[in-house]
């Protein structure tokens, strides 16, 4: 596992590459606890968002087991009217959560920004 400084450096690089960056966190899937966070807005509760997204991933994994799906989750994308949220699994028990302003970015740019740096998180 990378050091706390390395995790924060990766989140800073993602912030620099993701137009409209709102917030990002590295999250422990089992506990929902954040391992690293970076936010550009104080009104965005990243700790709560990380914990709830942990539950979202767990539910999707449960659905996949119920359906007998054998693949793995690469990422989960949620588009709101004004934001894009990406949950990218970076290990069996860890995921990256990223939120950006939709007016300043698009899905391809978000995925590109994450994929450029996600390798440093495993």
Image (cartoon, rainbow, N blue to C red):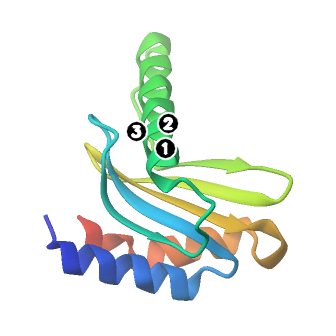
The kind of secondary structure element at disc 3 is loop
The kind of secondary structure element at disc 1 is helix
Specify few, some or many for label 3: CA neighbours under 10 Å numbering under 14, 14-19, or 20 or more: few
The CA span between labels 1 and 2 is 6 Å
| Residue 99: image tag | none
Specify few, some or many for label 2: CA neighbours under 10 Å numbering under 14, 14-19, or 20 or more: few
Q: Position of residue 69 (x, y in %)?
A: 45, 23
Q: Quadrant of the N terminus?
A: bottom left
Q: Residue at x 42, y 35 (%)?
A: 71
Query: Which residue position holds label 1?
Result: 48
The CA span between labels 3 and 2 is 20 Å
The reply to whether discs 1 and 2 touch (Cβ–Cβ < 8 Å) is: yes
Q: Quadrant of the C terminus?
A: bottom left
Q: Position of residue 83 (x, y in %)?
A: 75, 59
User: Which one is closest to the eye, mark 1 or mark 3?
Assistant: 1
Residue 109 appears left or right of 39: right
| Residue 52: image tag | 2
From the viewer's perspective, is residue 97 above or below residue 54? below
Query: Which residue position holds label 3?
Result: 72
Instruction: State the residue in front, 45 or 77.
Output: 45
Q: Earlier in the sequence, mark 3 or mark 2?
A: 2
Q: Position of residue 34 (x, y in %)?
A: 33, 53
Q: Residue at x 31, y 77 (%)?
A: 8
């Amino acid at each position: 596992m990378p050091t706390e400084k390395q995790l924060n450096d990766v989140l800073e690089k993602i912030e620099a590459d993701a137009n409209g960056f709102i917030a990002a966190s590295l999250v422990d899937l089992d506990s929902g606890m954040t391992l690293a966070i970076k936010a550009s807005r104080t009104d965005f509760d990243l700790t709560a968002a990380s914990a709830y997204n942990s539950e979202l991933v767990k539910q999707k994994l449960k659905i996949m087991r119920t359906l007998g799906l054998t693949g793995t989750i690469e990422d989960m994308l949620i588009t709101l009217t004004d934001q894009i949220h990406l949950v990218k699994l970076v290990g069996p028990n860890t995921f990256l959560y990223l939120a950006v302003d939709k007016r300043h970015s698009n899905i391809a740019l978000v995925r590109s920004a994450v994929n450029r740096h996600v390798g440093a998180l495993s």
